[in-house]
Image: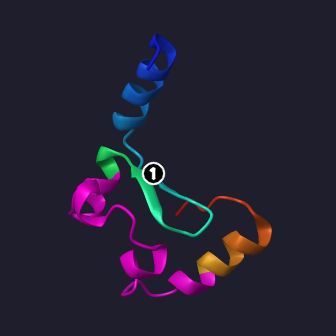
Amino acid sequence: MNNIEARADLHFENLFTAVLVFDQDLRLCRMNTAAENLLITSFRKIAGQTAVEIFAGSPGFMENLGRIMTTRNHLTE
């Protein structure tokens, strides 16, 4: 990892906003500390799970996911 990547990693981890990164199969491949705090779990425990598995109990999740997949835009709430 070069210096720029290390600094980007540090900024990612220190954001106050929860950020979850999913791959093309909607499997969790990265999340920052704020996301761990929001979800009350560690990345290690849920890495590789699908978005549907992680947010199964969240009202409106499938509707929001459908909108994201259709528009290819991010969602901020």
What x and y, as percent, mark residue 59? Answer: 45, 88
Q: Which of 38 and 49 is in front in this view?
A: 49
What x and y, as percent, mark residue 37? Answer: 24, 55
At x 51%, y 15%, the residue is 4
At x 39%, y 51%, the residue is 31
Residue 41 lies, with reference to residue 64, above or below; the image says above
What x and y, as percent, mark residue 50? Answer: 45, 74
At x 45%, y 51%, the residue is 19
**Quadrant of the rendered structure where residue 72 is?**
bottom right
| The residue stretch that appears in magenta | 35-63
Q: Mark 1 points at which residue?
A: 19
Tell me if 77 is positioned left or right of 75 in this view.
left
Tell me if 69 is positioned left or right of 21 in this view.
right
Residue 16 lies, with reference to residue 49, above or below; the image says above
Instruction: Name the colour scheme.
Output: rainbow
Could you tell me which quadrant the N terminus lies in?
top left
Residue 9 lies, with reference to residue 23, above or below; the image says above
Q: Is residue 55 magenta?
A: yes
Q: Can residue 44 be seen in this view?
A: yes
